[in-house]
Image (tube, rainbow, N blue to C red):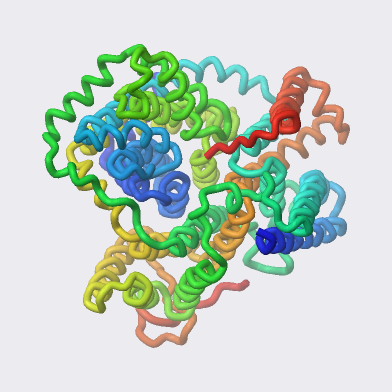
């Protein structure tokens, strides 16, 4: 363990490691600031560019992106009342009123400090839980991995925005698409339609990049315009004093910080829930517990802190299911899972046994990039906020350019550009009709893993399906799958209330 | 709303057909090879049929919005524009992809950016030119650090190393 930690730290502090981390940090912050472009998109755009990098440096790039989006998104949430990413929506509730009172600097400083505290909390929580989870992973066989992966998929379907059936159908479509191409277990081609291009299957990078990025760009560009105007009070701020006050606001509430950190970490561990749930749950709990409940919604420092701490705490803890079981703890980690596979890293017992240095690098990277961003962010926040005022029709072609270059770069095949385009069109249409894209990607990434677990389980039992139900851990997982799937159905049957996350 | 339900029904019907075609093709594979696609495919097909029936019922009932209406119906109203604006944006994206295929990244990128900035972003010709030149230069230099061979276009070689002469891979 200590050896892996030392190796991770050593690699991270090498010039290329630091450069990758800070590049990711910058990219995440810029995408986070741009309303509508944050979240999964920045990870998807970075995916092809990580291909030529060493796995460790690639993971540091993603650690930088994951940790910085939250703070990047808080800046327009505070200054423009427009959340940069979905998870910053709760920050608007107190950030913007505070900025209107002329305390924008204080609000941004609270957000920056809270992000740092949250990241630390999430990482500490993960490091505590990792040794506990480790023996559990080793106890898992193929049938358990089959059910665990299905459990992750169902949880994400239930949590994803949109209709439950559409989420399930999306997962199924993704899984079916993942079956195109050569099957290494049986050495035959499937569903290629005689195409040479599809021999290796639908390529991951252009598919995922196109699905998320191009569909988002179509929505973003056809909508046009830019976001709200900067507050007129921006120019009159005593930035330095407010920044110090913001730091004090966070450190004077240690219990609230620990509580939000814990809540964020817990949400992060549950597959698929992600930042918006973490920040809203933490905000609600903070409001209920606060002595100054009336201040909430009118510029409460506790409100901003609760959202930002929880949101960043979930980044570290969401790594736990991703790394240990190959089930993304949050939607953006579905892309991270894709990156693992792209770099030949196998999540699960093999990763825990052989690549712990990568896991620690991700954890340390999240904290280090947050330290960097918190310091730099407070200093240049007003300047950064202006990025979100650039009209979407100027930003969109740049992002499109990166998407097409990225799609081509991964394998150097020009038809990958066409694949990205086709995936983008599919993604747009699916989104338009309410199919959550995250379940399609989950199905696509997890499909081959589930198939392998499924077939190897059958090989273990000489073709008997009883193997899926006869082992104790399998049975527990079957019950969990059933409960996660059926409880929302039963609830919605009795109470016609909707639930939508992300 | 009625039109949206109809569009949704058409889209889901296309998904059903696509999936059915995959399952039909799978029936010709050996048992082990087709087993998992069947395990995933048949339930997905059943779910898609349910969604299709719901969309058809919604269409028949005057397109009454339901929980089934998804992001377009239940999400923020401003997220999705009409098909016209969407197709206009898509046409630009397709045009850029085609231009890349024919003329390669080095020529297509500045050309696309210049025309997009000038026509779609309403920038002046000078700003469009400057923006496209700087952005293309920066990105192409950056990308060349990752890949030595950029696609130069399917056209016959016109300007060695810049325009044309790439070999089209087998499709």
x, y percent for residue B29: 84, 56
Q: Quadrant of the N terminus of chain A?
A: top left
| Residue at the image position 39 percent from the left and 21 percent from the top | A121
Q: Give coordinates of residue A271: x percent, y percent.
A: 58, 31
In the picture provided, is A438 more to the left or to the right than A187?
A: left
Q: Quadrant of residue B99?
A: bottom left
Number of numbered discs on residues? 0
- Res. A323 in view: yes
Q: Position of residue A494 (x, y in %)?
A: 74, 29
Question: Residue B86, relative to residue A462: is it above or below?
Answer: below
Residue A364 visible at all: no
- Name the residue located 28 percent from the left edge and 42 percent from the top edge: A79
Closer to the camera in the image, B154 or A391: A391
Q: Residue at x 22, y 30 (%)?
A: A106
The residue at the point 35 percent across, 41 percent down is: A73
- Left or right placement of residue A471 versus residue A21 in this view: right
Along the line of sight, the residue nearer the viewer: A501 or A190 = A501
Residue A285 image point, x, y percent? 46, 19
In the depicted structure, whether residue B133 falls above or below residue A192: below
User: Relative to A112, does residue B66 appear above or below in the rendering?
Assistant: below
Q: Is A393 above or below relative to A40?
A: below
Foreground residue, A465 or A15?
A465
């Amino acid at each position: 363990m200590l050896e892996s930690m030392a190796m991770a730290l050593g690699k991270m502090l090498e010039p290329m490691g630091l450069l990758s981390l800070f590049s990711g940090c910058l990219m995440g912050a810029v995408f986070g600031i741009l309303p509508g472009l944050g979240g999964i998109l920045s990870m998807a755009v970075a995916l092809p560019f990580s291909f030529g990098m060493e796995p460790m440096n690639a993971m540091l790039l993603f650690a930088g992106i994951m940790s910085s989006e939250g703070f990047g998104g808080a800046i327009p949430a505070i200054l423009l009342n427009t959340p940069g990413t979905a998870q910053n929506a709760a920050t608007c509730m107190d950030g913007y009123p505070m900025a209107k009172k002329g305390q924008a600097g204080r609000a941004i400083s609270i957000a920056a400090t809270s992000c740092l505290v949250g990241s630390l909390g999430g990482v500490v929580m993960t490091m505590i839980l990792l040794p506990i989870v480790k023996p559990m992973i080793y106890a898992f066989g193929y049938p358990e991995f089959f059910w665990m992966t299905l459990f992750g998929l169902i949880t994400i379907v239930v949590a994803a925005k949109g209709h439950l059936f559409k989420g399930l159908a999306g997962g199924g479509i993704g899984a079916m698409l993942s079956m195109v191409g050569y099957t290494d277990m049986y050495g035959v081609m499937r569903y290629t339609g005689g195409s040479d291009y599809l021999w290796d299957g639908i390529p991951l990078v252009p598919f995922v990049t196109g699905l998320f990025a191009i569909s988002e760009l179509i929505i973003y560009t056809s909508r046009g315009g830019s976001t709200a105007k900067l507050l007129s009070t921006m120019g009159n701020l005593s930035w330095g004093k407010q920044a110090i006050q913001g730091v004090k606001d966070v450190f004077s509430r240690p219990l609230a910080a620990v509580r939000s950190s814990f809540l964020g970490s817990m949400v992060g561990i549950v597959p698929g829930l992600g930042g918006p749930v973490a920040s809203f749950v933490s905000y609600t709990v903070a409001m209920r517990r606060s002595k100054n409940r009336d201040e909430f919604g009118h510029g409460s420092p506790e409100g901003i802190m609760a959202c930002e701490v929880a949101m960043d705490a979930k980044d570290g803890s969401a790594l736990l299911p991703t790394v240990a079981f190959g089930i993304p703890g949050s939607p953006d980690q579905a892309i991270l899972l894709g990156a693992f596979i792209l770099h030949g890293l196998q999540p699960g017992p093999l990763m825990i046994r052989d690549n712990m240095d990568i896991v620690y690098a991700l954890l340390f990277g999240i904290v280090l990039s947050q330290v960097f961003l918190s310091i730099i962010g407070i200093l240049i926040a007003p300047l950064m906020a202006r990025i979100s005022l650039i009209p979407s029709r100027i930003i969109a072609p740049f992002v499109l350019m990166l998407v097409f270059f990225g799609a081509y770069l991964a394998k150097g095949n020009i038809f990958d550009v066409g694949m990205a385009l086709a995936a983008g069109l599919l993604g747009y249409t699916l989104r338009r009709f309410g199919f959550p894209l995250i379940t399609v990607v989950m199905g696509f990434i997890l499909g081959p893993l589930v198939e392998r677990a499924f077939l190897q389980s059958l090989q273990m039992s000489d073709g008997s399906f009883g193997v899926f139900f006869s082992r104790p851990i399998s049975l527990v997982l079957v019950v969990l799958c059933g409960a996660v799937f059926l409880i929302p159905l039963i609830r919605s049957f009795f109470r016609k209330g909707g639930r939508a996350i992300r | 709303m009625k039109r949206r339900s109809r569009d949704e029904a058409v889209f889901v019907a296309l998904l059903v057909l696509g999936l059915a075609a995959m399952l039909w093709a799978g029936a010709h594979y050996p048992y082990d090879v087709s087993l998992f696609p069947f395990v995933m495919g048949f339930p997905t097909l059943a779910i898609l049929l349910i969604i299709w029936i719901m969309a058809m019922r919604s269409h028949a009932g005057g397109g009454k919005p339901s929980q089934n209406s998804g992001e377009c119906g239940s999400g923020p109203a401003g997220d999705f524009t009409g098909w016209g604006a969407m197709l206009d944006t898509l046409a630009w994206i397709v045009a850029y992809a085609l231009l890349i295929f024919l003329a390669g990244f080095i020529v297509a990128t500045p050309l696309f950016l210049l025309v997009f900035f000038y026509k779609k972003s309403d920038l002046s010709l000078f700003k469009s030119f400057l923006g496209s030149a700087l952005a293309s230069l920066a990105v192409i230099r950056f990308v060349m650090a990752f890949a030595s061979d950029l696609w130069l276009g399917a056209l016959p070689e016109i300007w060695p190393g810049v325009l044309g002469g790439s070999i089209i891979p087998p499709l």
